[in-house]
Amino acid sequence: MSTAGRDAIQAKGWLRAHKWLLLRRASQLSILALFLLGPLAGVWIVKGNLSFSYTLDVLPLTDPFVLLQSLLTRHLPETKAFVGVAVVLVFYALVGGRVFCSWACPVNMVTDAAAWLRSRLGIKGGAHISRKTRYWILAMTLVLAAATGTLAWELVNPVSIFHRGLIFGLGAAWAVILAIFLLELFVMQDGWCGRLCPMGAFYGLLGRVSLFRPAAIRRSACNDCMDCFVVCPEPQVIRPALKGVEGAGPVILAGNCTNCGRCIDVCAKDVFAFGTRFGNKVEKVSPPASTMSPAA
């Protein structure tokens, strides 16, 4: 069983060691609740779904990945869809494209639950698929939209299926969600979100330019416990900032960082914190003092 975060709990207390995880769950559940209030309780604060929605009948929000597919089908969406995309793109430019994956996507709760159980059961290893595979799948979804003239991917997209299932009754959606859970639990860790999901790949590309970033602001205090690597869904993004690889600054600039904040939670030394990409100054390391005696 993984002990990641145990030292942080002892040093900071349970609440601070789970602060960002709890905020993420509150965000994910609140978003689902807003969508469900309409059809289930008749309170229409938000209408639509995660692909396109209206908030208070005023604010349109459009998934840029869906809009891109729509354009490739040679169907021109309404003007409000473009307005919704502009709003979303500005938001993602500020806080990071892949915040959708960790702060909004309901499938993330399923994969996190599988990761938690995998850790408790001590399941190690599994199949290995390159993280670049998701980009090939992303390209295939776009080619498929252009070739068929339909939003073919959205018919099998687990995020869309999960959302529709919650509103209209899960039914066959249970099979899709269960398949992802079992994939993460027994086949490969971070399999769906980290290696296969084309939405994650798309938002990762958007995340390359985002302003709001986590940073290893106290990387000199790192004791190499590796807890941040254990809990991070994209651990490959940590090392350059944490270890100053090839002179890298402390800010995690990789687009695939989901801004989940787990590295902040589990670090007992408070190495990580959220900041902006402009705080990327390279730490100055003083040269070691000479141990040689001065010449007589």
Image (cartoon, grey):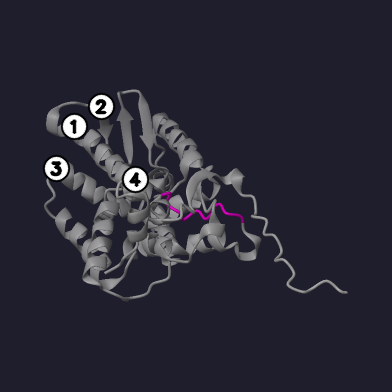
Q: Which of 165 and 272 is in front in this view?
A: 272
Q: Give the range drawn in magenta.
A: 249-259
The image position of residue 126, as x and y in percent, is: 31, 76
Identify the residue position indicated by label 1 in the image.
37
For residue 208, side relative to residue 115 (left or right): right
4 or 3: tag closer to the N-terminus: 4
Magenta stretch, main secondary structure, is loop
* Tag 4: amino acid: Lys
Which amino acid lies under the numbered mark 3 shown in the image of this protein?
Answer: Phe
Which residue carries the number 3 mark? 168
Q: Distance between the residues labelled 3 and 2?
A: 18 Å
* Rendered image quadrant of residue 285: bottom right
Quadrant occupied by the N terminus: bottom left
- The nearer-to-camera label among 4 and 3 is 4
Q: Residue 19 carries which label?
A: 4
Element marked by disc 2: loop
Q: Specify few, some or many for label 4: CA neighbours under 10 Å numbering under 14, 14-19, or 20 or more.
A: some
- First in residue order: circle 1 vs circle 4: 4
Q: Do the residues labelled 1 and 3 touch (CB within 8 Å)?
A: no
Residue 257, percent from left and from top = 46, 54
Q: Distance between the residues labelled 1 and 4?
A: 27 Å
Residue sitting farthest toward the front: 296
Residue at 49% over, 60% down: 238
* In the image: residue 18, left or right of residue 254: left
Is 43 left or right of 275, judged from the image as shown?
A: left
Camera-nearest label, 4 or 2: 4
Q: What residue type is labelled 1?
A: Leu
Mark 4 lies on a secondary structure that is helix
Alpha-carbon span between mark 1 and mark 2? 8 Å
